[in-house]
Image (cartoon, helix red, strand yellow):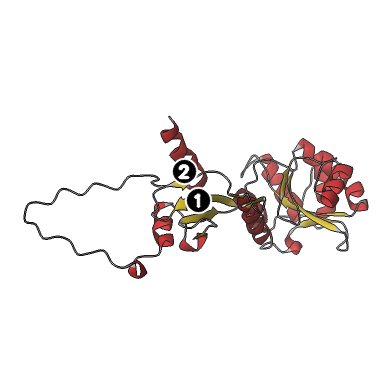
Amino acid sequence: MLNRLIPIAFAALFGVSAIAQAPAQAPAAAPGAVKAAAPAPASAKADPRDAIAKKIEGLKPDDVRMSAIPGLYEIARGSQIGYVSGDARYAILGDLIDLDADANLSENRRRTIRNRLIDTVPESEMVVYGAKTAPYTLTIFTDIDCGYCRKMHSQMAEYNRLGIRVRYLFFPRSGPNTESWQKAESVWCATNRNDALTRAKNGETVKSSKCPTSIVARDFELGQKLGVDGTPAIFLPTGELLPGYSPPSELVHYLKTGKMP
């Protein structure tokens, strides 16, 4: 049972075309057959990253790098992290922990990747609430029809008062060609996006002229790369992901101390 589940789980994350397949057995040599030439020296062998990238659908060699364990390679698909042996035969699901440093190396890597992906979106293409001088700037994926997103937005003044600046990106959970998606497009096309988003979250109908709406599709795709599977999805300046709603006082306490009260 376990042998079946591991490849399935890995394929679900990374789209693996073939994982953990044993190499085909070569036929026995006939008597008197000429022996094959000796294998090429290690320096002449192909880069393991190429073999790993070929094994996993959609992966590029640049998405593969050596991990902290010799012979084990880290692969990244969006912000998802996995590990594959240098011969591209074995895959490992789970986080890599440095026991001496008491550090989750996989999570540290995820945070770096998350920040890099979020930084590809200019602030001018976000809906921002709060002063640039605020001590904390959070990037939040929101769904206009999400109840906890609405609750969080209703407390925006308190978040801002406590020094939290919010940068919204759209993540209509229902997907393209749905009412929630259309609402996000209407907000983005509005002349005053901040006012339009507040009205939409209050249940009002926002009417606006048509405009290029690829911004919603881009945000949604980015959220998927970042591993967003619910809203609100709160990304801290460190790259940490906090899924779900947090009251203003609890969130600012966590930002200051790293612990929830």
| Quadrant of the snapshot with the C terminus | top right
Residue 211's place in the image compared with 203, above or below, is below
Q: Is residue 51 visible?
A: yes
Q: Nearer the viewer, residue 8 or 3?
A: 3
Q: Horizontal placement of 158 versus 14: left or right?
A: right
Q: Are marks 2 and 1 in contact (CB under 8 Å)?
A: no
The three-letter code of the residue at mark 1 reads Tyr
- Structural crowding at the residue carrying mark 1, measured as other residues with C-alpha within 10 Å and reported as few (<14), some (14–19) or many (≥20): many
In x, y percent, where is residue 105?
62, 53
Q: Horizontal placement of 128 versus 231: left or right?
A: right
The three-letter code of the residue at mark 2 reads Ala
Q: Secondary structure at mark 2?
A: helix
Residue 148's place in the image compared with 115, above or below, is above
- Structural crowding at the residue carrying mark 2, measured as other residues with C-alpha within 10 Å and reported as few (<14), some (14–19) or many (≥20): some
Q: Mark 2 or mark 1, which has the lower sequence index?
A: 2
In x, y percent, where is residue 108?
65, 54
Q: Nearer the viewer, residue 203 or 134?
A: 134
In x, y percent, where is residue 124?
76, 63
Q: Which residue is mark 1?
A: 83
Query: Residue 13 shows which numbered tag?
Result: none
Q: Image point 83% across, 53% down: which residue?
A: 194
Which callout, 2 or 1, points to the residue nearer the camera?
1
Q: Residue furthest top?
A: 1
| Quadrant of the snapshot with the N terminus | top left
Q: Image point 68% across, 44% down: which residue?
A: 172
Q: Horizontal placement of 242 versus 157: left or right?
A: left
Q: Which residue is mark 2?
A: 11
